[in-house]
Amino acid sequence: MIIISFYFNLVKKLGDLTFALGAQLAPHIREQGTKLLTSTFKSDPKEAKDTMDGVLTVAAGGVQGFSTIYLGLENAARILAKSLSTETVNIVGHRYGNEAGEVVGNAVYSIGNLALTTHNVQSLGVKAVAKRTAKDAGKAVLKDYAEDVKK
């Protein structure tokens, strides 16, 4: 259990780090995107900024929609896994006795914890960290844009 807690905390800290890095990169990404549009398409800076703002508006809506769907699916999966494990324990308990139900319950919970730990360990690789940093930078760009729009 200590190892699982350690990995969970490590993954959480790594996520915090990538989010902080993304927040630092966000203003630069937005500024460089505007400069790139200006130089590539030979348009004036105001038009390039408006184009970049339009792209960010569409991207923000897409991210928000995807996030809502993803969180809903993640929550449904969690509820389904809990219900399946609980009902499996109940069925085994009725059929073979409470002690057998407890053994099966411990096995099912152990498998669930193993799957979660495996997922968390895979989140520690260089590729996973780079991917997470890119996602967090994109989220930070959209957040930075949303704050500018409110002003």
Image: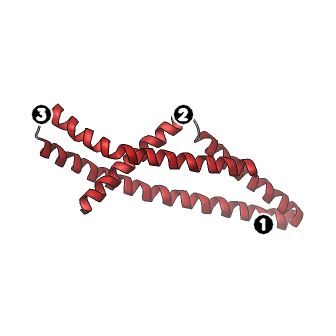
**Label drawn at residue 150:** none
| x and y percentages locating residue 144 in the rendered image | 32, 53
Q: Is residue 97 visible?
A: no
- Tell me the kind of residue under disc 3: Lys
| x and y percentages locating residue 73 in the rendered image | 51, 57
- Vertical placement of 9 versus 45: above or below? below
Q: Quadrant of residue 28?
A: top left
Question: Dot 2, crowdedness within 10 Å: few (<14), some or many (≥20)?
Answer: few
Give the mark nearer the N terminus: 3 vs 1.
Answer: 3
Q: Quadrant of residue 67?
A: bottom left
Q: Are marks 3 and 2 in contact (CB under 8 Å)?
A: no
Residue pointed to by mark 1: 90
* SS type, badge 2: helix
Question: Dot 1, crowdedness within 10 Å: few (<14), some or many (≥20)?
Answer: some
- Vertical placement of 125 versus 18: above or below? above
Residue pointed to by mark 2: 126
- Tell me the kind of residue under disc 2: Val
Give the mark nearer the N terminus: 1 vs 2.
Answer: 1
Going 40% across and 48% down the picture, which residue do you hit?
A: 23
- Residue lying farthest to the top in this orientation: 40
* SS type, badge 3: loop
Tag in front: 1 or 2: 2
Going 47% across and 39% down the picture, which residue do you hit?
A: 131
Residues under labels 3 and 2: Cα distance?
Answer: 38 Å
- Tell me the kind of residue under disc 1: Asn
Q: Is residue 124 left or right of residue 64?
A: right
Residue pointed to by mark 3: 42
| x and y percentages locating residue 124 in the rendered image | 59, 39
Q: Quadrant of residue 86?
A: bottom right
Q: Is residue 105 left or right of residue 126?
A: right
